[in-house]
Image (cartoon, rainbow, N blue to C red):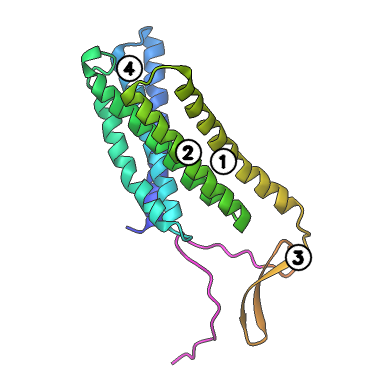
Amino acid sequence: MTRGRLARVLWIGAAAILVAAALVALAALLRGDFSETDGRILLTLAALLYAGGTAIAGLALADRGPARRLGWAVAAVAPVGLALVLAAIWSFVWEAENEPWNKLAWSAVLALLAGLLATTALLLARRPVLVRLAIAAGALALVAAALSIAGIWSEPEGDTYVKAVGAAWILAALAFFLVPVLQRLTAAGVAESEVRVLARLDDVELVATRSREDAIEAKLEPGERLALRRRQAVG
């Protein structure tokens, strides 16, 4: 199965999860009783959606760019994080004797969040300066997640550590949201007539343009890329 088809399967699964969550919520509403099992089912569906979205972002990043290793790493970690979260949800997560499972689950949630921010920021970035900003967002998210996980397990006293963790997450969120904002801002400032040469073959150029005149609307299948080559002889 290609990565494009796998991503499509994951998106279909995401839609199925949303439908299932809505059905569980409706059943609880009509029954007039929201049981503990209903809560765990909804948490399970939310965990599946969260980990699945992280895996999709990782696979999308693995499909292009120099950060393919990061994409594969995030896609590989997502099922592990999901397993830890599900183990906590169905192991009487709120009981004190299962505190290690709770800590493992929250650690997995934070690690997946760092991976999701890093991969999504790189996917949104199109210009070199924004790629560097996306890398900074991913690095800050990784630092914030590491500090948060360390705090979960060591339980430090005082407000200094909490403030440091909060500052790291704020900076990570700032860098992450600046990527799409600046992407749109820089795109809006480019004239429609401006073209960017992608490849040349003799007197023929393959260019990227914002103008619709003489433009080709190429619809590519997942995983396909444009290539410029000489016409091959038939027979």
The residue indicated by pointer 2 is 141
Label 1: element kind: helix
Mark 2, Cα crowd under 10 Å, few <14 / some 14-19 / many 20+, is: many
Q: What element carries label 4?
A: helix
Q: Residue drawn at (27%, 32%), measured in percent from left and top?
A: 84
Discs 1, 2 touching: Cβ within 8 Å:
yes
Q: In this view, does 141 lie to the left or right of 190?
A: left
Q: Kindly report which numbered mark, 2 or 3, lies closer to the viewer in this rendering.
A: 2
In this rendering, is residue 26 above or below 234? above
Per the image, the residue denoted by label 3 is 194
What number is the disc on residue 5? none
Q: Name the residue under label 1.
A: 176
Counting from the top left corner in percent of width and height, residue 32 is at 38, 7
Question: Would you name the residue on which mark 4 appears?
Answer: 38
Residue flagged by tag 1: what amino acid is it? Answer: Phe
Query: Which is closer to the viewer, label 1 or label 4?
Result: 1
Q: In this view, does 187 lie to the left or right of 42?
A: right
Helix, strand, or loop for circle 2? helix
Name which of mark 1 and mark 4 comes first in the sequence.
4
Counting residues from the start of the chain, the first of labels 4 and 3 encountered is 4
Mark 2 and mark 4: Cα distance apart in space: 32 Å
Q: Nearer the viewer, residue 32 or 74?
A: 74
Circle 4 packing at 10 Å, graded few (<14), some (14-19), many (20+), is: some
